[in-house]
Amino acid sequence: MCFLRRPGAPASWIWWRMLRQVLRRGLQSFCHRLGSCVSRHPVFFLTVPAVLTVTFGLGALNRFQPEGDLERLVAPSHSLAKIERSLASSLFPLDQSKSQLYSDLHTPGRYGRVILLSPPGDNILLQAEGILQTHRAVLEMKDGRNSFIGHQLGGVVEVPNSKDQRVKSARAIQITYYLQTYSSATQDLIGEKWENEFCKLMRKLQEEHRDLQLYSLASFSLWRDFHKTSILARSQVLVSLVLILTTATLSSSMKDCLRGKPFLGLLGVLTVCISVITAAGIFFITDGKYNSTLLGIPFFAMGHGTKGVFELLSGWRRTKENLPFKDRVADAYSDVMVTYTMTSSLYFITFGMGASPFTNIEAVKVFCQNMCVSILLNYFYIFSFFGSCLVFAGQLEQNRYHSIFCCKIPSAEYLDRKPVWFQTVMSDGHQQTSHHETNPYQHHFIQHFLREHYNEWITNIYVKPFVVILYLIYASFSFMGCLQISDGANIINLLASDSPSVSYAMVQQKYFSNYSPVIGFYVYEPLEYWNSSVQEDLRRLCSGFTAVSWVEQYYQFLKVSNISANNKSDFISVLQSSFLKKPEFQHFRNDIIFSKAGDENNIIASRLYLVARTSRDKQKEVVEVLEKLRPLSLSKSIRFIVFNPSFVFMDHYSLSVTVPVLIAGFGVLLVLILTFFLVIHPLGNFWLILSVTSIELGVLGLMTLWNIDMDCISILCLIYTLNFAIDHCAPLLYTFVLATEHTRTQCIKSSLQEHGTAILQNVTSFLIGLVPLLFVPSNLTFTLFKCLLLTGGCTLLHCFVILPVFLTFFPPSKKHHKKKKRAKRKEREEIECIEIQENPDHVTTV
């Protein structure tokens, strides 16, 4: 192996080049030996994956178990809201607040809710009989009902010019029924049965009361409608598989019945399928629990696995046809598996970082863990199971067997005596020309289209300005979308779109969005409530809220009763002996914690209830209220916490969902930078970083403009976008930077001709397989479809439009290759002249 030093090049550059060449050739040599091993033992490499699939697949059927805790999945694992819930629950246990109006402040618990909606233009207050019948029907239900806690009005119209805000009419009314469970498994089971009966009763009452619309919700409704997506998507996933199988089979076919490989395309997709089944078996055997977010794993694995399948097929087509089939398999492995190993490693690194403890969303962590296993098995199955299939297909081709019917292809003389249809079906397409022409695989319809039409068109000088304008438009919309990113803390984004939970949430958002949920305001240390400065601080903290406060009621009681309580003893004495004895104030007993030290009583903790006025964007404003109140608990003299069960899902959700993408992106960037001067060519990594960044930001911006929030599904898709972009751009870019043609235009044509077929086959199969997701009535699958469609579309745009044009403008330069070839040509001409001068008799006249 000889390395020539470029004039003026430093010695360090030579060493880096030598190191890159050694690493690259070492990897190619390893992959060549791997291919040789597979070609010599195809039965073994075919049998082992099949046995693994049967073993773990059957194990998955016996160990399948769905995840039952929705909060554990989609709420941030480590949040201040959970600590606040524990503190609030320890101060005011739920069993001591069973008759309280807002007894759901610690935990949602078991409950049943119903919204009664009157027809447009009607007044719900005039439907009292129907409301009371519904209420009585619920109260007659047995097993677990604790208390009816009241109602709320929605769509309220007030009496004009009314000083006391009298209600003229209302469109909707909401009733909530809470059940007591006290953390008892038996009572929880009874509560679950009660909720099922409650939902059945609401459906029955809806049929009886046609003049009212009933929308019901129970505590298990969100979990049920979350898992409903998997049930609804079963048939569509099978249709997706059939579409991908069909596309892969057709795109691998040729008119040439000898060199076409339709069954290899089909077997490649099946290889990815059985690897996913094996990964699922391992997941369930290790006590994993299924949730609907895992529905995206087959599509993620298919996008990466079929890329390896189509690249191996392209690598097979690039091998010399006159070589033995075992050598051709080894050469294909040497050509393809180096890049595929690198991209698979990056998949494992990015999803491994997503599965790290830094990830605060359990659903994302579980998905990434399963994806890591899928990627490892995918890689193993591609080089073993599919490699064995490639060996058998190569043996059939070498022995001149038909690629579909597996029968011997007849001779040209025999075909000439047969009908035209028989000649078309049985001809290898090269009977009239030399059987061993340079590259008979160039007749593949995609490769022919790229070589004869597309490559010339995209590199045309008149097309390039339009491509630059197109990219500027793409970048502008992407940047505009990146400035409008919104978090997806709304759990409705993960539910089946036609479910009762979504219908209930839409009606509640429309008619009951004027006020926030009831927020518990907990003072967890002794306060001098009789002190005027403390009273002023409490009023200031509660300003802007509608407060249900024992403090305010007590101050009003003292003022009306004309009682002076300016010291501790008087304040607590009147509070216990007079105020809390009144029937209208007895419910405040559960809001105050007294302690007795000798003969002296103290107030060590208390709670208030706050309700904020909100607009239509209720959730965003509640998060803003939470973020404003928490810093005040540290800066003010009063130490307090605020809590509502919905805070568990909202608390720092945007940060929790974006961290996995940031970590994965940082991991990819770090790996590419560390290998900047080690693998293949530094400019290849540089262009790869730019391309992946452009695709990632484009997908992020466009999905925001398409009204996709940053929830756990979109975050997983963004992590996948990083890898999908690398998977398709890396082979194209590295082939370009290593090409030795005279000009950049010729180099990009060579790159597209070498890898364009596999890229187009894979992205087309991937996008066609997404189409059935459109017909699943679920917000989760619709988000998955949108994100993956943008991922495939942006990657295809960069590989076939943007990069082929921009690479003709910018480095790497190809002038030194041109100079080298000129020098070699000149040296060859000089040698020929010297030989002619020494042997003049050798020259003959033609």
Image (spheres, rainbow, N blue to C red):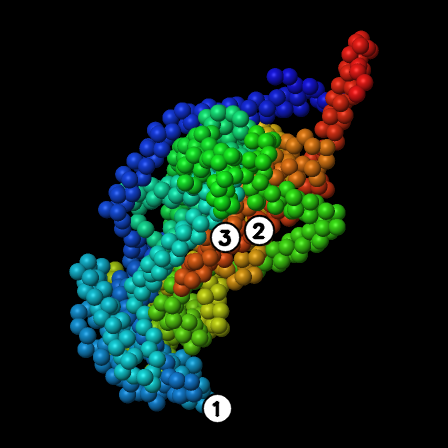
Real-space Cα separation, disc 1 to disc 2, in angstroms? 56 Å
Where is residue 107? Give x, y as percent.
31, 62
Type of the residue with mark 2: Cys
Indicate which disc residue 792 carries: none
Q: Quadrant of residue 589?
A: bottom left
Q: Is residue 698 above or below residue 373?
A: below
Toward the viewer: 176 or 741?
741
Mark 3 vs mark 1: in front: 3
Quadrant position of the C terminus in the picture = top right
Question: Which is nearer the eye, 277 or 251?
Answer: 251
Q: Residue under circle 1?
A: 160
**For residue 282, which quarter of the picture?**
top left
Q: Position of residue 463 (x, y in %)?
A: 72, 50
Residue found at x 54% / y 39%: 429
**Mark 2 touches mark 3? (CB < 8 Å):** no
Q: Is residue 349 above or below residue 87?
A: above
Label at residue 767:
3
Q: Is residue 62 above or below residue 580?
A: above
Dot 2: what SS?
helix
Q: Which residue is mark 2?
A: 794
